Amino acid sequence: MNFIFVLAVGLVAGTISGLVGTGSSIMLVPVLVYEFGPKEAVPIMAVAAVMANLSRILAWWREVDWRACAAYSITGVPAAALGARTLLVLPSHAVDIAIGLFLIAMVPVRHWLARHQFTITLWHLALGGALIGYLTGIVVSTGPLSVPLFLFYGLTKGAFLATEAASSLGLYLSKSVTFQQFGALTWDVLLKGLIAGSSLMAGAFIAKRFVLRLDPNVFRLVMDGIMLLAGLSMLFNAATSS
C-alpha cells in the first residue's frame, strides 16, 4: 500500500512536472519523507529525479540547447556532489527544517525574479549552475530557481523543458553517485527510487500533449501552491518528530 500511494502521487507529480518543467520533487518528497524518513527520502528522490529528467529529454530530444546545458552542468555537477556530501553529515531534523524553509522561501524569490526581466548569457548559466547545483545536493530540488534561469536565457516550451531536464540530469547523477560512494544509496534505496521514478516518467509522457495549452498564469499559481503546501508539510513533520 505504501508503494501504491507513492506511485499515485508520483504519477500526478510527473504529469505536472512535465507541464511546467519542475514540481515533481516538491510534491513527492513530503510523501517519501512520511513513508521512509528524511535521510532515506533524499537519495530515493535523487534516483527518481534522474528518471524524471531522462523522460523529459526523451520526450523533447530534438529541442535540447546543448550549449546552455553544457554551461550549466560544467559547474553544477561538481557543486551537486559537494552539496550531497554536506547533506549526509546533517541531522535528519535539520534536513526537514532546511527543505521546508527553502520551499516556502522560493515563493517570494520566484516573484522577485519575475519582476526583474533579466537577460542572461552562458556565463550567467555557469554561475547559476554552481550555486543551484550545491543547493540541489542539500535541499532535494531547486527547480523553482533553475526554471527562471533557463527562461531568462530565452528558452520556451519544449526547448525549455528539454534543456532544463538535460542540465538537471547531470546534477542528479552526480548527487546519486555521491550518495552511493558514501553508503547512502543502498540496493533497497535504489529499488525504491526506481519505483518512484517509473511513475514520474509515465507522467512526463502524459503531459507532453498538454504543454502547448498551459496558461503561464496557471503555472505560476500551481507552483506557488505546491511549494507552500510542501514546505509547510516538511516543517510540520520536523515539529512532530522533535
Image (cartoon, rainbow, N blue to C red):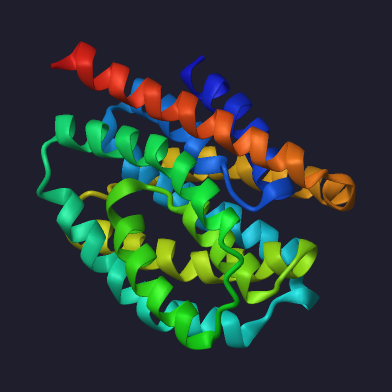
Q: Is residue 168 left or right of residue 63?
A: left
Whether residue 188 can be seen here: no
Q: Quadrant of residue 235?
A: top left
Residue 118 location in percent, x, y? 57, 71
Residue 221 is left or right of residue 24, and the answer is right
Q: Is residue 7 above or below residue 71?
A: above
Quick check: 171 above or below 36? below
Residue 204 on image: x %, y %: 71, 48
Residue found farthest to the top? 240
Q: Position of residue 57 (x, y in %)?
A: 68, 66
Please name the residue shown 74% across and 70% down the image: 159
Q: Left or right? Give the position of 44 relative to 168.
A: left
The image quadrant that residue 68 belongs to is bottom right
Measured from the top left, where is residue 26 in percent x and y? 48, 38
User: Residue at position x 22%, y 67% from top?
Assistant: 82
Is residue 2 placed above or below 37 in the rendered structure? above
Q: Quadrant of residue 24?
A: top right
Closest to the observer, 73 or 154: 154
Foreground pick, 16 / 56 = 16
Q: Residue at x 61, y 62 (%)?
A: 54
Q: Is residue 57 visible?
A: yes
Residue 149 relative to residue 234: left or right: right
Look at the image and tell me in which quarter the C terminus lies. Answer: top left
Front-most of residues 69 and 216: 216
The front one of 122 and 8 is: 122
Q: Residue furthest front?
A: 115
Residue drawn at 58 percent across, 55 percent down: 115
Please count the marks in the image: 0
